[in-house]
Amino acid sequence: MKKVSVFMLILVLAFGLIACSSGGNEETSSSKGNGVTKLTFWAPLSGGDGDFMKELVTKFNEENKDVKVELLNLKAEEYYTKIRTSVTSQQAPDVALAHASKLAELQSANLIESIEKSSTDAKIDWTTFSENILNATIIDNEHYAIPLDTHALIMFANKKILDEAGLLDADGKPSIEEGAEGFVEFLKQVKKNSPAGTFPLSATSNGDSPLRMWWTFYSQLGGEMLNEDGTKAAFNNEKSLEALDLLNEMIEGELWPKNIKNGGELFTAQKAAIHMNGVWMTGALEQNKGLEFVALPIPQLFDQPATWGDSHLFVIPKQEKQTDEKKVASLTFANWITEHSASWAKAGHVPSKPAILESPEFKELEYRSDYAEIGDYVSYMPNSPKLSAINDVLKKHLNLFMNGQSNAKDTLENAEKEVNALLSK
């Protein structure tokens, strides 16, 4: 009996020591250990984007010994579902990347924090950001995010094809006359003076590309998606018809041929003179050493410069037990990334801070400076909690339009009815 009692005493003491040890480590590892604030950071990045962000996080950790950031890169298609789940289960990260197009949806679902107070404590200077890009992060006059970039629709041009067609100017850029008529005439000349099988313009015919092209031209005409209070569609009008008429003229003239499954592949294979896509294509295209191209803003064809765009933003997911200290540390980290985002521009994105655009590191990057101006006039879709659903409606009806199954007038009327029904729920 004595032997059993001694053995049990040893076990109790041993488990007691283990429990005390593990309890202390658990508390410090989740917040602060050895004077270091530990932050979890989620992002939905793929390809080169993920690698560039990983490098930035590593550099931040090396330069900031009092904060350690752990990056978790998740699949984009699962990302926002996991954000929602993490908040409801009290397992949310300390800081996360989100898209400007998702901001209102996240805010209305109470999944993210206003950063108005924390940004003051973190000494964020909002005047160091592009005003146009920053405006996309403000809801009801409160800041909800720190913008990292804008990734917008731009124009890529194959220099070899255009040179052989006599359509390059003295600077090696496309020679395009002003206005929509000038752009259409330019594409007609490409078709006329290029080898058979050359696409004057390549952009994927269904899905995002038609929506982004329509929004670009409609925004150049000063169009709005929704009314002032966001309760009704405001796009069924003459300006919108004019934008669709331009798309239709390109389609019917076989300048933007129907049924293009992947416009990027056509341009990379040097079968297209012009390609409309996001700035993220820049990094991929420059890896093709046999491709001579320029990357430029979408031409101003109507009243004002504008192009479709979105942004990567840093947000603070809701956590009941999140400390002010960690919120400030998260925003300090986010701001540090924006101040070192010249390397992020390698992915093609335009940094949110104008000072970065003037830095030697940014200017050394080929192509980027040629389209960096888009940060001043990128046209964001409205901060509506139902924007994703609205875009799905628009894409559906624009697909029918692109395939010749609906005219411009019916396309807008049908989309308007469906969007109004959506907004009324």
Image (cartoon, rainbow, N blue to C red):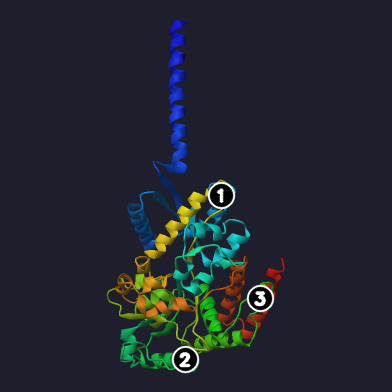
Quarter of the image containing the C terminus?
bottom right
The residue nearer to you, when weighing 350 against 197, is 350
- Foreground mark, 2 or 3, reads 3
Task: Tell me, for residue 353, which label it has, or none.
Answer: none
Q: Secondary structure at mark 1?
A: loop
Whole-percent x, y for residue 34 in the image: 39, 41
Left or right of residue 63: residue 330: right
Decide which of tag 1 and tag 2 comes sooner along the chain. 2
**SS for tag 2?**
helix
Dots 1, 2 in contact, CB < 8 A? no
Of badges 1 and 2, the one in the foreground is 1
Density class for disc 2 (Cα within 10 Å; few <14, some 14-19, many ≥20) is: many
Q: Where does label 3 land, which residue?
A: 228
Q: Which mark is residue 319?
A: 1
Q: CA distance from mark 1 to mark 3?
A: 32 Å
Q: Verify CB contact (< 8 Å) between mark 2 and mark 3.
A: no
Mark closest to the chain's N terminus, 1 or 3: 3
| Amino acid at the residue labelled 2 | Val
Quarter residue 17 falls in: top left
Residue type marked 3: Glu
